[in-house]
Amino acid sequence: MDSGLWTLELLGVFFSLTAGLCSLVTLMLPRWLTLSTELLPTESFQLGLWETCVVQDLGVTECRPYDSLLGLPSDIRLARILMCTTLVTGLISLLFAIPGIYLVNSCRRTENFEAKRTLKMLGGIFSVVTGIIGLVPVSYVAHLTVLRFFDESVPNVVPRWEFGDALFFGWTAGGLHLVAGFLLVTSCLVLQDETCSLHQSIALNRTRPEQSPRRRTEYV
């Protein structure tokens, strides 16, 4: 098999793993949105999917979790659901893709690569779906933040939320999931039907040399 296909498969799995870690950081990081005001220059506020935090200049951070799910804003509630879905679908894509790569030897005797190609194709499709699902919440929250930031009906003295680090982690995770899915699907389309090399069995039974018939002598 061409080494270029190995590279596509390994890069696809590597990007998928990295995207999964970025998605986990995006879900848990309490810095989706940040806010600082001139009235309290020594404090800044952070908003995440699970809690809100107050950060002081001295390095002291105080976080408070949300009281209830139903009392959350609609954008935060939707983002929480979609990010949890992203982690689940990303895990499913890895469970399909890893057994389907060529370096994971699961072929025996005359079995072809059709099953491995199917697993890898499913992993690539799930990775693309995961990337789309992961990009939706961060882009939606960013869109609402931009609309609220430039809302002319709100007085200028009112502080406004701005982008936090979690949004950039989310965009990175979504992009990596899309790239991983593209690499895995491409490796499936390039790969031709091949069969595993057969291991020739070594003959254990040795042939016995034929014994020459004894000559019988007759005495007269």
Image (cartoon, rainbow, N blue to C red):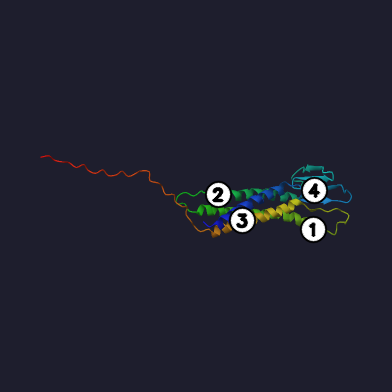
Q: Is residue 74 visible?
A: no
Query: Which residue is drawn at the image coordinates 51% and 52% (left, top)?
Result: 115
Label at residue 181: 3
Q: Which residue is mark 1?
A: 147
Give the percent coordinates (x, y) of residue 4.
Answer: 56, 58
Graded by Cα atoms within 10 Å as few (under 14), some (14 to 19) or many (20 or more), the crowding at tag 4 reads many
**Furthest residue toward top:** 219
Kind of residue indicated by mark 2: Pro
> Mark 1 or 4 closer to N-term?
4
Q: For the residues carrying marks 1 and 4, which lies nearer the camera in this image?
A: 4
> Mark 3 or 1 closer to N-term?
1
Q: Which residue is mark 4?
A: 46
Closer to the camera, 4 or 150?
A: 4
Kind of residue indicated by mark 3: Gly
Which quadrant would the C terminus be assigned to in this image? top left
Q: For the residues carrying marks 2 and 1, which lies nearer the camera in this image?
A: 2
Could you tell me which secondary element the residue under label 4 belongs to? Answer: strand
Graded by Cα atoms within 10 Å as few (under 14), some (14 to 19) or many (20 or more), the crowding at tag 2 reads some
Are discs 4 and 2 less than 8 Å apart at CB?
no
Query: Which residue is drawn at the image coordinates 71% and 48% (left, top)?
Result: 25
Kind of residue indicated by mark 4: Gln
**How far apart in space, not on screen, are marks 3 and 1 (Cα)?**
32 Å
